[in-house]
Image: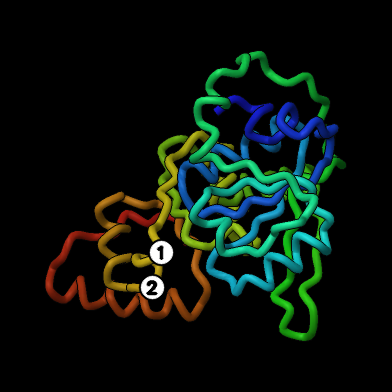
Amino acid sequence: YEIRNVTGVQTCALPISETLIGLYLETSPEMIIAILAILKAGGAYVPLDPEYPSDRPLYMIDDSQTRILISTEDIVSRLNIKGSEIAVILLDKEVEAIQSEEETPPQTIVKGENAAYVIYTSGSTGEPKGVIVTHKNVTRLMGVTEALYQFNERDVWTLFHSVSFDFSVWEMWGALLYGGRLVIVPPHTRRSPEDFYRLLINEKVTVLNQTPSAFTQLMKLVKRGKEIKQKKIKLEVV
């Protein structure tokens, strides 16, 4: 995808520096590409999970004053944004327009203190609250853990969590920063410990990020696998 058009610089005639751009997409390679496009163009992404009830992403769009929304025709139909001033870019409808654009890289200057993304709290104690996370915050996270884990290009990571959950930042950028391989876990696999266990074996995953409750379920399957002499998981870091 051509960076500027994906992020709406030409389509919407907006200044892109730190412009907040909503991502209302399923977890997919296209979503990863869109995130890279937004950041390369100097913007900041606002992840909106399509699995949320529609009132939540609508609230987040309004609260963050998101001005551009990247989605697909099918997914965006779940939101009632008719009459809204937000500019919508549908990746599945604008492929030809995107491919026809120049491939000249955008001329942007991004500093560590610039916004990279906005993440929202769960809202369990009231309305969800948005938190701006800078590029420096992300690079610091990777920097302080580098000596502990010594990640490299041979590592295989899973993108298990929704991009609306801050855990996804560690999963996604850990793989991309060190040149490793990122395995996007399908929704049905995330909901099935057995299927996820098989994915870990088949993809030879070496870096896994899990909540304690999910990890407990996985460990029961690992123990069972040892008892019946199944193939071993290649995990090195959990």
Q: Residue at x 68, y 37 (%)?
A: 38
Q: Nearer the viewer, residue 164 or 200?
A: 164
Amino acid type, label 2: Arg
The residue depicted at 68 percent of the width and 71 percent of the height is 56
**Viewed as shown, does residue 169 lie left or right of 15?**
left
**Residue sitting nearer the eye, 25 or 54:** 54
SS class of the residue under badge 1? helix
Name, please, the residue furthest toward the bottom: 125
Where 30 sits versus 234, above or below?
above
Q: How is the image coloured?
A: rainbow
Give the labeled residue for mark 1.
187
Q: Name the residue under label 2.
A: 191
What crowding class fits label 2: few (fewer than 14 Cα within 10 Å), some (14-19), or many (20 or more)? Answer: few
Residue 191 coordinates in the image, percent (x, y): 38, 73
Residue 140 visible somewhere in the drawing: no
Query: What residue is rendered at 74% in x and 78% in y?
Result: 123
Q: Are marks 1 and 2 in contact (CB under 8 Å)?
A: yes
Q: In this view, does 104 lie above or below 15?
A: above
Residue 18 visible in the snapshot: yes
- Neighbour tally class for label 1: few under 14, some 14-19, many 20 plus, Cα within 10 Å: few
Q: Is residue 143 left or right of residue 176?
A: right
Q: Residue 79 carries which label?
A: none
Q: Quarter-wise, where is residue 110 in the image?
A: top right
Question: Would residue 41 appear left or right of 110 to someone viewing this image?
Answer: left
Q: Please say if 191 is above or below 184.
A: below
In the rendered image, residue 50, in percent from the top left (x then y), is placed at 55, 63
Residue type indicated by callout 1: Pro
